[in-house]
Amino acid sequence: MNTDTRVPGARGDAGLTPRVALRIAWAAWVVLLLLPYAILPFALHETVSAPASRSNPRVASAWFLGIMLCLLLALLFAVVWRIPKLRSYWLGDPVRPRRYLCGMATLWGALMICGVVAELVCASTATFAPNVLPAAVALLAYVILRPEGSVMTAPVEASDEPSNAATRNG
């Protein structure tokens, strides 16, 4: 029985199997997920305990527009940059583990950078609104994009699905 789960033809992955890549992806994802929660107490303390004179809604609104634009552009860049990395999956072949990790890390990094900047702006301007919105959007999108690793396995074609076996056999 062959237990080698490496992607066929994956050169330069130095024995990186889909299983190991998925473990690395989960570890990176959890560490990045904890980052905004590590900053949250600082942001809450600075926002709640700041004197009213330090609150600057006009600056916060300007930062809001900047962060939303950054979030839009960063996500657009990450998705477009990730397309060639996952291209082999759309052609019916599995994605190399290293390409999977690189593509997902780019997307996760873009989300986390924008979310953390939004939290820091909340703290520096001593305002929750409106910058808590991009932080929440980034965190929600990040949670939705958890590691699955399904692209590192061959896609199931419609004729390979068990539900179609009865129609083939007749």
Image: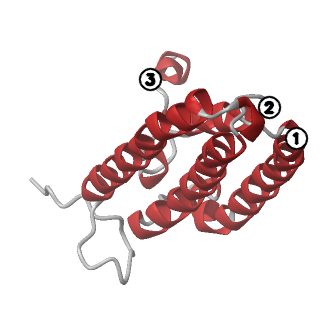
Taking the spot 76% from the left edge, 50% from the top edge, the residue there is: 71
Q: Quadrant of residue 77?
A: bottom right
User: Which percent across, then down, holds residue 26?
Assistant: 34, 46
Question: Mark 2 = which residue?
Answer: 130
User: Which percent across, then down, holds residue 147?
Assistant: 44, 43
Taking the spot 64% from the left edge, 52% from the top edge, the residue there is: 117
Taking the spot 61% from the left edge, 48% from the top edge, the residue there is: 120
* Numbered-mark total: 3
Secondary structure found at label 2: loop
User: Which percent across, then down, holds residue 73?
Assistant: 81, 58
Q: Residues within 10 Å of mark 3 (few under 14, many from 20)?
A: few
Secondary structure found at label 3: helix
Residue 162 bears which disc, if any? Answer: 3
User: Which percent across, then down, holds residue 55?
Assistant: 76, 36
Taking the spot 80% from the left edge, 31% from the top edge, the residue there is: 130
Q: Quadrant of residue 89?
A: bottom right
Q: Are dots 1 and 2 in contact, CB under 8 Å?
A: yes
Q: Are dots 2 and 3 in contact, CB under 8 Å?
A: no
- Asked whether, in this view, residue 141 is left or right of residue 13, the answer is right
Q: Is residue 159 visible?
A: no
Amino acid type indicated by mark 2:
Pro
Q: CA distance from mark 2 to mark 3?
A: 49 Å
Q: Residues within 10 Å of mark 2 (few under 14, many from 20)?
A: some
Amino acid type indicated by mark 1:
Ser
Question: Mark 1 = which residue?
Answer: 61
Secondary structure found at label 1: helix
Residue nearest the observer in this picture, 169 or 44: 44
Mark positioned earlier in the residue sequence (2 or 3):
2
Residue 155 bears which disc, if any? Answer: none
